[in-house]
Image (cartoon, grey):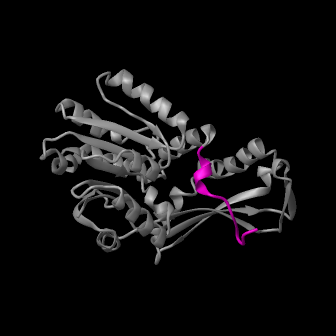
Amino acid sequence: MQKPKRLSSKYFYDEKGDKLFQAIMKMDEYYLTNSEYEIFSLQKDQILQAILTRKNPFQLIEFGAGDGLKTKLLLEFLMEIDADFEYIPIDISSHVLEELESQLKIKWPNLICKPKVSTYFEALHDLRSDKTKLVLFLGSNIGNFNLIEAQEFISNVNENLNSGDYFLLGVDLKKDPRVILSAYNDKGGVTKAFNLNLLDRINRELDGNFRTENFDHFPTYDPVSGETKSFLISKTKQLVELKKLNKTIEFNYAEPIFMEISKKYDLEELEFLASKTNFEFVEHFHDCKHYFVDTLWKKK
């Protein structure tokens, strides 16, 4: 058993987890969604200008598409100008992709949409072709990796692209620590419910007996590293059984379970990351408060 105990954040997203995360994105405290939505609302034509100047067919590929809230702004613009493209949302949640595809078919019947339930790199490998690609990784999902993991991840993206392909990375920036912490510890307890839902999922799928009332949600933020970390803290000494795994897990009082990391960046770190992963930095697109950035890179 690892110490500290940890659960992988990729398991957050079952049907209930998807809905809870969509609720998180609508919270007042969770500024990330509104900040990036503002960028896409006001700067979508500038974001797309680089790739559209080539006038050739391209693929708009989105990692972790979710409900496509921000991407729909790009899709609307591309449909209005009759761009020659296909949209390929990639997610590990078939439920989310089915909902997204259904919504898009109603709004834009002529949109070529090819959802893929897959891991990112398997999907990118399968999509290898001579078509120009614009890969979107939005919502500061890159923050779910530490700096070393982020570099490895982006290097893998680069290896699956052709020279001249583009990568648009949505990133939460370092700022007032109190603003950041409130986004991960909202007054309504939605983020807490999102974390605790993973224990409920373990109960459902592994015949476990986690009692969620015996755990509390606790986030931290380090302004030097930019790392926000979320933990569930055991309120009592307890045993948890996972019958399908024939396993019993012991928790001590105040013992943490590490749930996820959400790293924040500054612009210098991002430009260094681009150069280290064989990308050429093109442009930063900011919201009005400079809380968030969508940074556009091109494969060398």
The outermost residue toward the bottom is: 224
Residue 104 in picture, x, y percent from top left: 38, 28
Which residue is pictured at 33% across the width and 50% down the height?
135
Query: In the shown orientation, is residue 53 left or right of residue 231?
Result: left
Whether 81 is drawn above or below 219: the answer is: above
Which residue is pictured at 39% across the width and 68% down the height?
265
Quadrant of the rendered structure where residue 257 is?
Answer: bottom right
Query: In the shown orientation, is residue 264 left or right of residue 197?
Result: left
Query: In the shown orientation, is residue 68 left or right of residue 243?
Result: left
Can see residue 291?
Answer: no
Camera-nearest residue between 79 and 293: 79
Q: How many discs appear?
A: 0
Residue 184 in picture, x, y percent from top left: 55, 57
Q: Quadrant of the C terminus?
A: bottom left
The span picked out in magenta is 1-13
Residue 165 in picture, x, y percent from top left: 25, 54
Which residue is pictured at 44% across the width and 67% down the height?
152
Camera-nearest residue between 211 and 167: 167
Camera-nearest residue between 42 and 59: 59
Whether 221 is drawn above or below 130: the answer is: below
Quadrant of the rendered structure where residue 240 is?
Answer: bottom right
Which residue is pictured at 78% across the width and 51% down the height?
213
Residue 59 in picture, x, y percent from top left: 29, 42
Quadrant of the rendered structure where residue 69 is?
Answer: top left
Q: Quadrant of the N terminus?
A: bottom right
Can see residue 249?
Answer: yes
Residue 11 magenta-highlighted? yes
Residue 3 magenta-highlighted? yes
